[in-house]
Amino acid sequence: MGYSSRRRANEEWKNTACVDKVRELVLDNSRSNEGKIEGLTEEFVNLEFLSLINVGLFSVSNLPRLGKLKKLELGDNRISGGLDVLAEKLPNLTHLNLSGNKLKDISTLEPLKKLGSLKCLDLFNCEVTNLNDYRGSVFKLLPQLIYLDGYDVKDREASDVDGVDDDDEGVKDEDGEEEDFDEEDDGVSGNEEEEDLSIDDEDDNDDVEAVQGEKMKQEPNDNDDYEQKKKANQLTNPFPLHPDTHPHPAYSTSLSQL
C-alpha cells in the first residue's frame, strides 16, 4: 500500500470513528446523486438533527436509517411522494419540514400516520395547502400531530403555547403565585437593624456616663485644690496670704509711733 493510500485509509478511519459522536448535521445547498448525499451514512448512529434544505432530492427512499433522528429539514426540494420510507428508517421523528416541495394531495401524507412521535409538520408553499379544509383534513388524518405550519388545531402559534421564559422572576408556591423572599427578608433585617442600633445607643450612653463618673472621682475639684493649697501656705508661710486685710504684728505701727 502506497503512502497516499495509507493516508486516505487513515482519514476514512478517523471520519468513521467520529461520526458516532455527531448530534446535529447541516448539509444545506449540497448536491445529491440519485437521492443520495455523499458522506451521509448509517454510521451517524446518534444523529438527532439533520438538515437537507435545497439539495435536489426527488425522493426520500435513499435516506440512511437513523434510529435516533428527531428533526428532519427537507425544505425546498422536489419530493412528491414516497413518504412511507420515513416511518421505516426514521421511526422516532418528531419534527418534519417538507415546505416548498411538490406535495399536492392529502393522500400523500397518509404514510406519516406511522410516525407515532410526530408532533410538528411544516408544509409551507406546497400545493396541498391550497385545498379546501386543508388544516382540518391534516389534523384528522394525523391525530398525533400538535402543530401544522407552526399552529395548533385552535390556531394558536407554537411559540405562544410552548414559549418558556429563561429568566425566572420568582419562585411559585403551590397555588401558582410568586413569592418574593427577598423583600420579606429585607423587611425583617431592617427592623432588626433598627432595634440593634437603638440598643447600641443606650449602651453607649451608659458607658459614657460611667466613664465620666470615674473621671470625676479620679480628678480633683478646682475648689478643693485651692483649699488644700491655702492650708499648706498657711502652715509654711509665716505671713498671711493677704497682708492688707490681715496685717502681721511685725508690721503694725501707728502714726504716733513714727
Image (cartoon, rainbow, N blue to C red):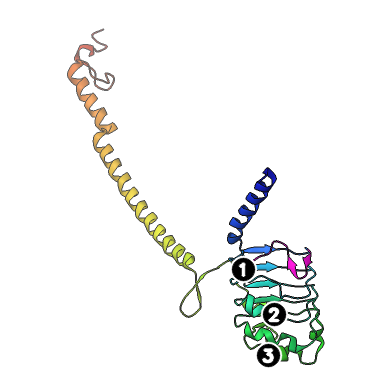
**Image quarter (top left, top right, bottom left or bottom right) of the C terminus:** top left
Q: Amino acid at mark 1?
A: Glu
The residue stretch that appears in magenta: 31-42
Residue at the image point whose x is 23% and y is 24% from the top: 230
Of callouts 2 and 3, the N-terminal one: 2
Residue 30 horizontal/vertical position (percent): 77, 63
- Contact between labelled residues 3 and 1, with CB atoms less than 8 Å apart: no
The residue where tag 3 is placed is 141
Q: Is residue 94 visible?
A: no
Task: Classify mark 1: helix, strand or loop.
Answer: loop
- 123 left or right of 194 in image: right
Number of labels in the image equals 3
Q: Main secondary structure of the magenta part?
A: loop
Q: Which mark is residue 48?
A: 1
Residue at the limit of the structure toward the left, as seen here: 235
Q: Amino acid at mark 3?
A: Leu
Of callouts 1 and 2, the N-terminal one: 1
Residue at the limit of the structure toward the top, as seen here: 258
- In magenta stretch: residue 37: yes
Residue 140 horizontal/vertical position (percent): 68, 91
Residue 77 falls in image quadrant: bottom right
Q: Amino acid at mark 2?
A: Leu
- Contact between labelled residues 2 and 1, with CB atoms less than 8 Å apart: no
Task: Classify mark 3: helix, strand or loop.
Answer: helix
Looking at the rendered image, the disc whose residue lies closer to the viewer, 1 or 2, is 1
Q: Which mark is residue 121?
A: 2
